[in-house]
Image: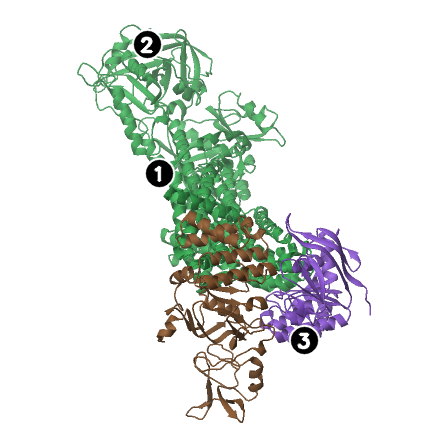
Amino acid sequence: MNTELKIQTTDLYKDFGPDVQVLKGIDLKIKSGDFIALMGPSGSGKSTLLNILGALIRGTEGEVEINGRSINNLNKKELTLIRRHEIGWIFQDFNLLQNLTAIENVMIPLHLDGMTGKNATEKAMKLLERVDLADRAHHLTDALSGGQQQRVAIARALANDPDIILADEPTGNLDSESGKSIINLFLELAKEGKSVLMVSHDVALANSAHKVYVLQNGKLVEEIDSMEVEI
Amino acid sequence: MGIMNILDSAFHSFQSILRNKRRSTAMIAGIILGVSILSGIIIYTEVLQQENFESIVDSAEYEVSFKVIESIHGESHLWDVSSLIQNDVRIESSTVITGPRTSVFDNEKNSFVLTLSSELEDLDPESELSAFTPLFVRDNFTDTSISDKITSSIVGSFNLTSTETNQTVIPEIIATQFNLQVGSIIEHINITVAETVERGPSAGVPAKSETFTLENVEVTGIYSSSGGAAGLFANFESSKLYFNTAILDRFGENVMPLINEYKYQYLAVKINSNEFTITDLDLMNTEINTLINDISQLAIGESGDTTIEGTNEIEQLLGPFEILNVLLIIFDVILVLPLVILCLYLLSFGLELALEERKREIGIFKVQGADSKQIFTMIRNESLVLFSLGATIGYLSSIFGAWIIGSATGFMEFDLDNINQFNQFVSFNVAALVTSVLIILAVLTINVYKKGREFIDLEVTEAVQRGSKIKKGFFRRNNLDIFMVAYGLLAGLINILIWETQFFEAEFFKKINFDPNTFIWTLIIDFLGIIFLWLGAAISGARIAKWLPQKSERLFLSLPKLKNVALIIRSGLKRRGDIDNLVFIIVLTLSISTLAGIQGVTDQALAEDTLEYNIGADYKITFSSRSNRSADIMQYTGVKEVMELPTVSASVLSSSTTVYGMNPDIISSLLWHDLGFEEVSLEKALADFKVKGDIPKVMIGTLLAEELTASIGDEINLRVKIADPVENVTDIARLKVKVIGTFNHAPGGVDQDSIVANYDTITELQSLIANNTLVYDDQIPANTYLVNAKNGVDKNALERDFTSLEGYNEIRNVEREISEIGQENNYGIPGLLTMMYLTSLIASIISAFAFSAIIMERRKREFAVLQTVGATSTQIYTTAFGENFLVMLTSVIWGTIAGLGLSYLMNGFFAFIGEFLGRGELPRTIVLEWNTLIINGLIILVGMLSATLISVISSVRQDLTEATRTI
Amino acid sequence: MELTETQSKQLILARNLYAIYKGKGDSQNVVALSGINLDMKDGEFISIVGPSGSGKSSLLRILGGLQNPSAGRIFYHGNEITKLDEDALVPFRRNYIGYVFQEGNLIPTQSAFMNVVQTLRFAGVERNDARARATETLDKLGIKHRMHALPSKLSGGERQRVAIARTLVMKPKVIFADEPTGNLDYENSEAVMGLFKDLHREENTAFLVVTHSKHTSKYADRSIELRDGRFVGEHGLDMDIDDLDLSRKVLIQPDGTLNLPLEMLKLLSMYGNLWDFSVVKEGDSHYIKATPAEVSDLGGHKHEFCPVCKKAVKPSDGQCNSCGASLM
């Protein structure tokens, strides 16, 4: 299996204004096939780190490399393309488009990238099969349960074959059963060689990941035994 | 403390508004536009009334006149009064006239009458025209405004200031007869002062008379027989010779006492219009009458009572002026009403948007423990602050708006050299401010109460959640809008048929007694049609704007640029429940701007056509006397052809008419309008015209034809009065002519009551009148000539050449006058239409912006997510464009159609007003400049799309972590 | 419903609460709460636990007067607040209830300071007094130095503290809090919970807190567990939020019903629709015996009744056709 470095940060700092330094020198290495959980008090670092890795915002100092390529000095368009091709996002609120069907939602990134028509439909269908929702392909989003919506979101995230999956509290709005099935999907994706970085509050679920990192006081701590984690 | 609280809340309101600029946009726009239009119209109307008054009254050389009812001592009596009133601010200038006045106001019937007559002895001792009246005029000391006024309407000048040399101003009849020009010297003029017996066997025989001779009198001015100085002092007998009063003194000490005894002096007074309340005519008349009585008191005689009696000369003139004012106000109101409705809707729509945005905030207030009264107070206070801001800006821009209306010389045309008028409009006009503020404030208050209540009563959870309920209005739910728009369109169609075709003149309609021009049908069709069409189209617009994009979605979304974002667009389209309001406003505004545009162009075209019709060729030159001028005119190389236009007055049956002579060879190159040659074409009629036959051939106006029940082929009798019949012979003569064509409007202002004949026929008629056989060598003499210039000639230079022709009186130049159309008194109609056009344009773009801004703000999160999954900025803009384009395009097209219908529906109304403004001669045909309409629609479409795209900018530039934020 | 004297003394008494949300388009109605009862005394600290989507937030909103229940009644010290109009709720909002949302919900165009001051001003507190009290409370929460910033300039945690300040400053009888420490780090969570505890102790303020957090839930005297809109059990001080099965006490409700955890219900569902349980002792063990409840009409057709609207429903219906409640 290809175990090259997918995400790497070197001494990453992030300031929000003069007195607020949220990230204080993060060194993070994520290889393909890694399923990493990131924990810690949210809103004060975790999400920020994820957002930087997802090329949504820039760090203040330090290197960030995605797939071996530094993203620090890329312009807006280049970052968009990175997001489109190399990263798949999964949100706590699913963020699917209303008034569209499951398969249409999955097709959106394909369309944005220029793949349309039959090719797009076929690929989208395959992705839905992957997440076990082929039978609901033509249901509108609000006819799907929370767990189903999240799975559609995962299918969407996989649309352009990204190497990296970033998930921000993916099970936050799901019941425990659906949550578990999502985690299982992540594990499968990791086995297939993708890197999955998941931010979560849920200790039990986080424990299913290969590694757990905790962000404390702006610094990253690797935890193996999560029972010691104070939340 | 009360004041602290008020200031505090005002401050907080202001702060809140500043921090929420976006949501207040539509609302404040509505307030500003509304106040601006309402005050603007009021300010403008007042300025207009002043201008109208000045133009009407200015045409009179004086407004008040005094006659002597009791002699005191000579002319100096009135002259003293004249100098006494000099300093009265109400008076601009005055002068004293000496001469016999027609006894219109004089009830006394003296058996003796004083005659002043003069003879141009040496010129024509036998002349029958020698009995013209000398009139003696003297200028005021300091002001020549009366004489300047007269000067401007005559050839030469009315400057009889010299008492050393003899000067006179003569009528053109004399000038023509004796070949006199300005500057000519008349060697002898005899002036006879005689008392004559008026009635009885020795009537007319002078009892005592004296004759005085003036030597070497210089002609300083010549006045024509119509208008000008003949109309001046109209109460005096016509055919006057004007001299300076001082001359009378030279005639000895007997003359003036005699004149005094017969009270032949009159004081003419010109008022200063600024000192009178021209907006209230009753009041003004009272003020004038007060002035008259004040002056009367300056000439108290021995009896202790006044010796002079004054007359308000313009009382008669003011009646129609008042009607005109009222009409103008009605017109203003009708035109401005839809604009005001538009602004009020914008205000209400804006308020709703603003409240919608505050829904969440209101919920939070409640959680904080606010009761509905407290929340309502906050909303109310903010609305009031917003209103104060808006009203102030609105009033200031109303001044600007009034100036636009007043300065427009044509539809969307401004003469940049003439901007001096701006000062007139800058003022603190209480009426305007109070009216506009009250109306807008009332509407705002009602809305705040009603809508505020709705939002305040929401349950907290409902308020705090995102998403809004879509309520279908009353009209939509009951499908009334379809009925309304169908009604309106049908009414519009009927109007198109009325104006463009003769559909309704068919027998069928006469049988069922349906005449769409009667009042009741006008009310039903036009009046209701306008309202239903306008509102119905706006309400039903939402249906169409949703239906069309849905139907054409497949096609539209398969366009290459849009394919990538097609799905996103589709999702967006399905969510747009609140499109209704936006479409409503777009259709409302676009229909008005289309209406304004079409009627503006139509108005302009009609004005030009009317000019062309009245002038008839490149130039229309009038001379002071009837003579042969063709050769003179032809001497200029730029002239292509000349046609004299002689006239003869005649009667047919009991209709009186004017017969115009025209040259058949030149007729077809004249400016014909609205030909009306139905059964027979102009070419055929002309061909016929030229053929000489037994019976002279004529073309008659359609109205005359109708009155005479004459049609082509019929023979009619032209009847003329013989000028000097021999005794015992009848004094009328007849000429039988044949009708070979009918016209609606012939060139040169020849109307539907007239007859066009060739020169032979005219000569025959003139011979009959003169009771003599007249033969003209080359051309028939005429007062008026129609002249066409060669191509490429400098028409204005040629015009200047013409003015130096002998006997020249007046010239009209089509090209120049069309370019100057804007400067004539157009009563601000083009300005009003321009105002309508601009306001509706502004309103539509602001609405689109406000609406999009808020919608896009709500979808910020969605756009953030899309960018997170890989959409570029361009793709986001494309999405916004794609979603809005179809809807806006549909609305624009629908609005234009509605505007078209409205133009036809309102055409009758505009025509009615036009009749009072000199646009009533030709029928008002709607001019559809398709290019302009399309461009108009495009401008609005582009404007709105730009506004939409601008409102997306902040979404595109936002911090993308918005996507990961939990709700 | 007549209240007994004891019942009238309860701070909050809620009976048979249902929350049903209309489904969009074709989708079914969602029953977020199904027959919830609550008895809360003055000064009790209760936490509401359960997985996401179990209706916790709905319950909190309904009890807090922010949302009308689809069915059921709520009493505060014997005064019914269900079906009251907004203005009638105002005294309760000012004197009884303090509400802290999950997402802060501050007025975005006012500074943190003004957010708190305004709450007091609405209640009629004089201007200077309001400003003083606001400053004091913001200081206690450690954000005095940031109090003039607009909410958009504050971090999530700071916003949360302002929201809490806004509530605390009114000294309510009960504070409803939806994940109050969700966005706070350890130190600040401690500070906030400490404040809550102080209020609890000193002013006898009651607390009803929805939380995932182990830390927060430790402060509760007792915890109510919801699953899929139903009350499934109660927990005491020994609750471990990560392993609720261990501490769950299944209670018989005041109306005689017993709510079972989902897993148990799923096990039992193969026996058809179940309405009746009896606890049967066999030997040393207690068993729960479930009996399907059926009523036959005159024609011999079998019917059951919807628990919400009491209308007849067919056994095989997954959902009541009258009110949309989903049927087990």
Residue B498 appears in the figure: no
In the image, the chain rendered in purple is A
Label 1 lies in what chain? B
Vertical side of B140 occupied by B691: above or below: below
Name the amino acid type tagged 3: Ala
Corner quadrant of residue B860? bottom right
Label 2 lies in what chain? B
Name the amino acid type tagged 2: Leu
Vertical side of B294 occupied by B488: above or below: below
- The residue that disc 1 covers is B323
Q: Which residue is drawn at 39% across and 61% down?
A: C91
Q: Percent position (x, y) of residue B875?
A: 67, 56
Q: Residue at x 71, y 74 (%)?
A: A130
Q: Percent position (x, y) of residue B835?
A: 49, 42
Q: In this view, does B442 lie to the left or right of B550?
A: left
Q: Percent position (x, y) of residue C199?
A: 48, 61
Circle 1 residues within 10 Å: few <14, some 14–19, many ≥20: few
Q: Residue furthest left?
A: B303
In the image, the chain rendered in brown is C
Q: Percent position (x, y) of residue B154?
A: 44, 21
Q: For chain B, what colour was chosen?
A: green
**Mark 1–mark 3 distance (CA, rounded to whole Å):** 80 Å
Instruction: Nearest to the eye among marks 2 and 1: give it.
Output: 1
- The residue that disc 2 covers is B248
Instruction: Please tell me which residue lies in front, A69 or B400.
Output: A69
- The residue that disc 3 covers is A134
In the rendered image, residues at marks 2 and 1 fall on the same chain: yes
Instruction: Please tell me which residue lies in front, B471 or B60.
Output: B471
The C terminus of chain B lies in quadrant: bottom right
Q: What element carries label 3?
A: helix
Residue B446 appears in the figure: yes
Name the amino acid type tagged 1: Ile
